[in-house]
Amino acid sequence: MAAPIDFYFDFSSPFGYLAAKRIEAIAENHGRTVAWHPILLGFIFKITESKPLVSFPLKGEYSVHDMKRSAREQKIPFAMPSNFPVGTIAAARAVLWAQTEHPALATPLIHALYDAFFADDKDISETGNVMACAESLGIDPDELETALQDDAVKSRLKTAVDEAVKRGVFGSPFIVVDDEPFWGHDRLEQVSRWLETGGW
Amino acid sequence: MAAPIDFYFDFSSPFGYLAAKRIEAIAENHGRTVAWHPILLGFIFKITESKPLVSFPLKGEYSVHDMKRSAREQKIPFAMPSNFPVGTIAAARAVLWAQTEHPALATPLIHALYDAFFADDKDISETGNVMACAESLGIDPDELETALQDDAVKSRLKTAVDEAVKRGVFGSPFIVVDDEPFWGHDRLEQVSRWLETGGW
């Protein structure tokens, strides 16, 4: 069995959202699965001396245009959230917790959170909206609320971000196929060709 | 006759080089020509609060890997120049001058300069290497040397950069198809589909 494709993403990343909609089909076409890794770009940007794409003059305006155009081309529902960018620590913790406590629901939770933020304009920096997504999948919101304050869950996210940085992850989406790194939604076609050919 | 595709580029941009190798075939496939616009990113980065891709921690290392991988995939000769990034004011002025004084040689000069820098590791921040590229195409190097110091040529480049910024250009390559902007070598497939379909 070939190794899963590692998919690193931040919940506040529009291109992470678009790629999340497409990566499972790409993986499946090549007999792979996806290992999902929520990270926090805010922390990583301090190391890479960067900041969110939308906050650069000129580039920021273009990037929103580009996101919308890419979404339309892929026929993926997309609207820039009213409050953007936001901190996504609760969403990331919820997913890491679900990956061990409710593994069958963890990936559906990722999609529910991304859809809430980028299709339905629900501010997922608010814990209440994260809990609503979880509850819609049958997860007990009280159980999740406790987990979000659990030191073990907090520390799991810190470790996950540290390990991502060690692996060279600096953006979202960031995809690793058999140790080959690809950054960006716009690398998905190349990821497909890499999987198809074994690389070049 | 459909409008030409506007292709903005900096001579110190690896992805500008890769895209320059491919844009004419893409244009021709859709009955278009290419209008070449050399610009100076160093100036534009001050406005966009940015800096060369390779100078960001983590992202810089990845970007070199990504450039080499994209070049190999496209079978385009590519080596990171020993001296990089460099100022490309002489190369840009030479092209703007050639576009009026030797119009048939201006586009070949662009390719000669890009090849010198990214395939043959000739430092095109040195005027001597710019002149050698021009001379290889039959341009009189003395005539070019005079032109590079001509106030009218200098001012033409300043105007070109100002006009690019006014149009929203902030990176290289930057491609405009019928007022639709595309940034990056990685948007070429999308540019093709845009030309094919008329947009979406």
Image (cartoon, coloured by chain):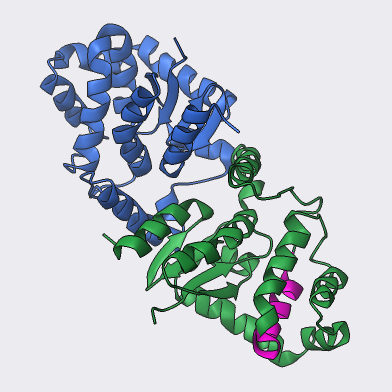
Chain colours: A blue, B green
Q: Identify the residue shown where x is 40% and y is 55%.
A: B190
The chief SS type of the magenta part is: helix
* Quadrant in the picture for the C terminus of chain B: bottom left
Q: Is residue B59 above or below residue A79?
A: above
Q: Does the segment drawn in magenta span residue B91?
A: yes
Q: Nearer the viewer, residue A191 or B48?
A: A191
Residue A35 in the image: x percent, y percent?
39, 19
Q: Please give left or right for residue B152 compared with residue A42 in the image.
A: right
Residue at left offset 84%, top offset 84%: B145
Residue B131 screen position, x and y as percent: 84, 75
Q: Residue at x 73, y 55 (%)?
A: B118
The number of callouts visible is: 0
Which image quarter: residue B15? bottom right
Say whether residue B151 is left or right of residue A175: right
Question: Where B137 falls versus B50 (above or below)?
Answer: below
In the drawing, does residue B102 fall left or right of residue A123?
Answer: right
Give the extent of the magenta segment: B87-103
User: Is B123 covered by the magenta stretch?
Assistant: no
Residue A177 at what x, y percent from top left? 50, 25
> Residue A133 versus residue A5: which sits nearer the camera?
A5
- Whether residue A157 is visible, yes or no, is yes
Q: Residue A89, can we see it? A: no
Question: Is the residue A1 above or below the residue B64 in the image?
Answer: above
Residue at the image position 57 percent from the left and 74 percent from the top: B36
Q: Position of residue B48 (x, y in %)?
A: 52, 62
Left or right: B20 as drawn, with respect to A185:
right
User: Is residue B3 or residue B182 the one in the foreground?
Assistant: B3
The image quarter in which residue B162 lies: bottom right
Quarter of the figure with the N terminus of chain B: bottom left
